[in-house]
Amino acid sequence: MIRPDTSLWAFSVSFYQHPNVEALCLRLQDQHAINVNWMLWALWLDKICQISDFAVWELGVSKARRWHCAIVVPLRRLRRCLPKLGFWGACRTRLLEWELRAEKRELAILERSSLNLIPINHGREREASSLFLNHLLGDLKGEQARVLELFEQWSQVG
């Protein structure tokens, strides 16, 4: 059972650690330029918060985009261009830590932007849609199906 008061960060960490999720997220990021934080947020909005107000999405994306482009993406690019061994490997490891902190902040921006817009019936049993996931993944129907399949597996474990 998924707790309706699950924070976006707690959900993201738990779901990302589920088998095959990390590989899928990195493939979506690297091959399709999908923002993984936005995908996790979309899943959280769709399946945990169970809301369908597109204003939530627009507000969150508008607030998080600047942070993502100015901080997260440059840290990732710099980390990926460094060698994995020796002195530069240590630098790369440190950059990864900073990148993860920046991603955590991005998730906090997304969650904060949606807190005032989550309806009173947040978390009550109802048919959860995939409105935001559909919007983000668009034509990647196979990938979307895989995300939903992994979500179902993850939700059965907890």
Image: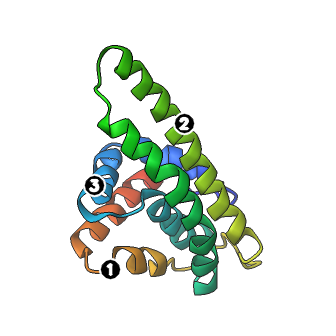
Name which residue lies at 73% across and 79% down.
Answer: 119
Q: Nearer the viewer, mark 3 or mark 1?
A: 3
Q: Amino acid at mark 1?
A: Gly
Residue holding disc 3 = 30
Residue holding disc 1 = 138
How far is mark 2 from mark 3, CA to CA? Answer: 19 Å
Compared with 109, 122 (above or below) is below
Residue 25 drawn at (x, y percent): 34, 53
Query: Which sits in the foreground, 26 or 5?
Result: 26
Q: Amino acid at mark 2?
A: Trp
Q: Secondary structure at mark 1?
A: loop
Q: Earlier in the sequence, mark 2 or mark 3?
A: 3
Residue 12 drawn at (x, y percent): 52, 51
Tell me the quadrant of the picture where the N terminus can be found. bottom right
Hey, which quadrant is residue 29 in on the image? bottom left
Name which residue lies at 58% across and 58% down.
Answer: 67
Q: Residues within 10 Å of mark 2 (few under 14, many from 20)?
A: some
Name which residue lies at 29% across and 24% down.
Answer: 84
Residue holding disc 2 = 98
Left or right: 130 as drawn, with respect to 121: left
